[in-house]
Amino acid sequence: MDIKNAKYEISNADYKKCPATNVPEYAFIGRSNVGKSSLINMIGKNKNLAKTSQKPGKTLLINHFKMDNGAWYLVDLPGYGYAARGKDQRQQFGKIIQGYILGREQLTCLFVLIDIRHEPQKIDLEFLRWLGENGVPFAIVFTKADKLGTNAGAAKVADYKKVLLKEWEELPPVFVTSSEKKTGRDELLNYIFSLNKEIAEGEKPVIEEELKAESDQQVDEGKKSEVETSEKGVEEK
């Protein structure tokens, strides 16, 4: 499966002003200069979809991209941990990120991007821990796999998992990607489409249950009406 189209829609600093829809959203986040914009462009098959820059920390808002004519959204969140930002600005971005992650009901999965070349960083591990503590569904996406050989990359991923297993009983889904080589795109999209399918199928029983509840209520009200009519008839006699 593949996407039909991808289009930028809107940017906001407040999650409450994000698109008023009920479709799934998949957000991407990571430390600055992790290759987030390039990955988004790879997924959307459009090198101009998200703005890329050699200067880290360019994503300042919550950016929504409409996918498959609005069937779902891809969301680009500001990066965290950019040291060049002042304390006040880091706190401001922290509020934007936290507000969306904890307040946006449409968020289906948060993809946390990690540069495959680096050892586990404290800031990433703390962020993953925070997500777990708050029950946020997430997956880990290793980026820039083309910078390492296949074996070296696999070893880095294995070592990272060992570190996580020291405090996690179960690991989230893990993906290895390269925007340069287009690696991991199919795996990411297949995962997203599988979640979309589960959501779509999961909605049907809910709707049927609601309809059944309404039907039962109507029957109960009908019976109640019959009883009241019968009792009224008895009183008149």
Image (cartoon, rainbow, N blue to C red):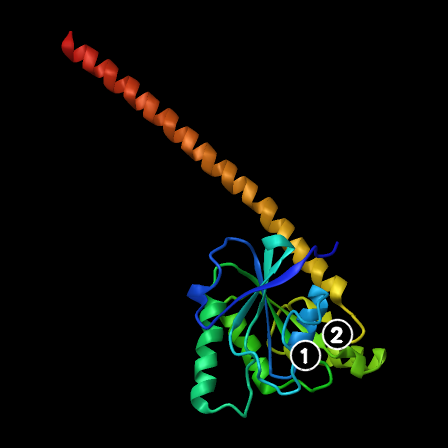
Q: Which residue, as the protein is rendered here, is positioned at the far left?
A: 236
Task: Examine the rendered structure and indicate whether residue 195 appears above or below residue 230.
Answer: below
Left or right position of 235 against 193 = left
Task: Examine the rendered structure and indicate whether residue 235 appears above or below residue 115.
Answer: above
**Quadrant where the image shows the C terminus:** top left
Q: Position of residue 187 (x, y in %)?
A: 74, 63
Q: Residue at x 54, y 40 (%)?
A: 205
Q: Position of residue 75 (x, y in %)?
A: 57, 67
* Dot 2 alpha-carbon crowd within 10 angstroms: few under 14, some 14 to 19, many 20 or more: many
Give, as a three-letter code, the residue at label 1.
Answer: Gly
Q: Position of residue 139 (x, y in %)?
A: 63, 68
Q: Position of residue 120 (x, y in %)?
A: 66, 84
Q: Secondary structure at mark 2?
A: loop
Q: Which residue is mark 1?
A: 35
| Depth check, front residue: 221 or 77 | 77
Res. 30 image quadrant: bottom right
Do the residues bearing badges 2 and 1 touch, measured as CB atoms within 8 Å?
Answer: yes
Q: Residue at x 63, y 76 (%)?
A: 51
Q: Which residue is mark 2?
A: 179
| Depth check, front residue: 130 or 112 | 112
Q: Is residue 155 visible?
A: yes
